[in-house]
Image (spheres, rainbow, N blue to C red):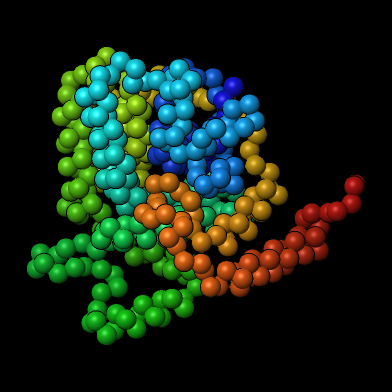
């Protein structure tokens, strides 16, 4: 039996078993191929040599990690959703998958992490429950930070254009004042900024450029699908699995501001039907034992001192191109000190005892 190591999900009750669209895509691919597999929900990226999830293990040996490599390995094992496609269709499938992974993910990240109401009221609380203590204190805001970094790198912000052509933002002001505000912001505790975002709601309008870009992608996908059951006929392909992996994370959860979901539901009913069709074929996976709280603390330390959070859909440049963190040693000492105080507190108060009673 194959073992798939994947990020957990804040929406398991909806039949979605990861918050990472690449993980959901691989899970859908394996189910549609009728692969026997077991799901390991983990935040420990050390299972993979390139610190990437999802990761596939067979006979206690890591075979591949990342969507494309896992699919290529499964094809070599005889599990090929593209077996009925000709060379032209294979090229089209690769092109459409690349389009989804590049364009649609930006709209998903924007909706989840840059629309403050969605993040503060739904995504962050659910993420905290998914990761458990102590990762709940670190990972949700780290993911938000790296989502913002990816989108900012691509020129996407939460600002909305006003009718006079100027950018509307909660932190807008004269250029000199803005630089001083940014300097002050860097010194404000992160927890205060998160609380502040609960009151400062970013506008989530369908006219935002990220949604316009997503609509262009959705137009192409909708026209390709047409009135067919799947993109290339009557049987699902890898493209269908990937489309489900990304669209299901948009369509199925209910967020306070559902702009992206409403766009798809109103304008692309055939894509909604495709997701429903695939979802009806998927079964609840066999789950392996979750990480213990001790493993969670080890992961927390590693996440806190890492240069970047290795989420495949968030990164925009390779890790080897990143400069070393000059404050890495200080971060490690800070985390170690915090954990020492935490353990001292719970032992002193009898929450945890080292005795065998």
- 276 or 82: nearer the eye? 82
Q: Position of residue 61 (x, y in %)?
A: 62, 32
Q: Could you say where residue 82 lies in the image, as x and y percent from the top left?
A: 33, 21
User: In terms of depth relative to the viewer, which is nearer, 65 or 215?
Assistant: 65
Say above or below: 64 vs 162: above
To which quarter of the image does residue 239 belong?
Answer: top left
**Residue at point 47%, 28% (across, down):** 73
Question: Which residue does the image show at 50% across and 42% down from the upper left?
Answer: 53
> Seen in the image, is 203 located left or right of residue 309?
left
Q: Residue at x 63, y 67 (%)?
A: 332
**Residue 15 location, x and y as percent?**
45, 30
Q: Is residue 89 visible?
A: yes
In this rendering, would 205 be left or right of 65? left
Q: Residue furthest left?
A: 164
Above or below, 236 relative to 202: above
Q: Residue at x 19, y 54 (%)?
A: 209
Q: For residue 266, say whether it is visible.
A: no
Q: Please identify the quadrant where the N terminus is shown.
A: top right
> With respect to residue 86, does 322 lie above or below?
below
Total marks drawn? 0
Relative to 129, say whether 272 is above or below: above
- Image coordinates for residue 336, horizontal then vertical, percent: 68, 66
Quadrant of residue 282 in the image?
top left
**In the rendered view, does 86 fall on the left or right side of 322?**
left
């Amino acid at each position: 039996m194959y073992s798939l190591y994947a990020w957990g999900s804040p929406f398991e009750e909806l039949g979605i078993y990861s918050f990472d669209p690449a993980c959901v895509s691989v899970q859908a691919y394996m189910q549609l191929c009728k692969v026997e597999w077991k799901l390991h929900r983990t935040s420990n990226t050390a299972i993979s040599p390139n610190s990437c999830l999802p990761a596939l293990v067979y006979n206690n040996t890591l075979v591949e990690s990342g969507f494309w490599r896992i699919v290529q390995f499964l094809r070599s094992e005889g599990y090929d959703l593209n077996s009925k496609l000709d060379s032209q269709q294979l090229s089209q499938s690769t092109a459409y998958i690349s389009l989804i992974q590049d364009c649609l993910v930006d709209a998903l990240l924007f909706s989840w992490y840059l629309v403050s109401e969605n993040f503060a009221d739904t995504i962050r609380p659910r993420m905290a429950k998914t990761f458990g203590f102590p990762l709940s204190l670190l990972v949700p805001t780290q993911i938000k930070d790296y989502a913002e970094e990816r989108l900012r790198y691509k020129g996407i912000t939460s600002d909305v254009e006003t009718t006079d052509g100027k950018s509307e933002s909660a932190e807008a002001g004269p250029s000199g004042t803005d630089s001083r505000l940014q300097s002050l912001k860097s010194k404000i505790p992160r927890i205060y900024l998160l609380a502040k975002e609960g009151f400062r709601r970013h506008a989530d309008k369908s006219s935002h450029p990220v949604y316009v870009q997503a609509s262009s992608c959705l137009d192409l996908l909708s026209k390709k699908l047409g009135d067919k059951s799947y993109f290339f006929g009557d049987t699902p392909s890898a493209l269908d699995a990937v489309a489900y992996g990304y669209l299901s994370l948009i369509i199925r959860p209910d967020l306070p501001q559902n702009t992206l979901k409403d766009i798809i539901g109103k304008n692309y009913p055939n894509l909604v039907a495709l997701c429903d069709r695939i979802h009806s074929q998927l079964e609840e996976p066999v789950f392996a034992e979750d990480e213990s709280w001790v493993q969670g603390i080890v992961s927390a330390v590693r996440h806190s001192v890492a240069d970047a959070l290795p989420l495949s859909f968030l990164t925009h440049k390779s890790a080897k191109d990143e400069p070393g963190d000059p404050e890495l040693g200080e971060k490690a000492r800070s985390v170690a000190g915090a954990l020492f105080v935490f353990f001292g507190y719970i032992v002193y108060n009898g929450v945890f005892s080292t005795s065998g009673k």
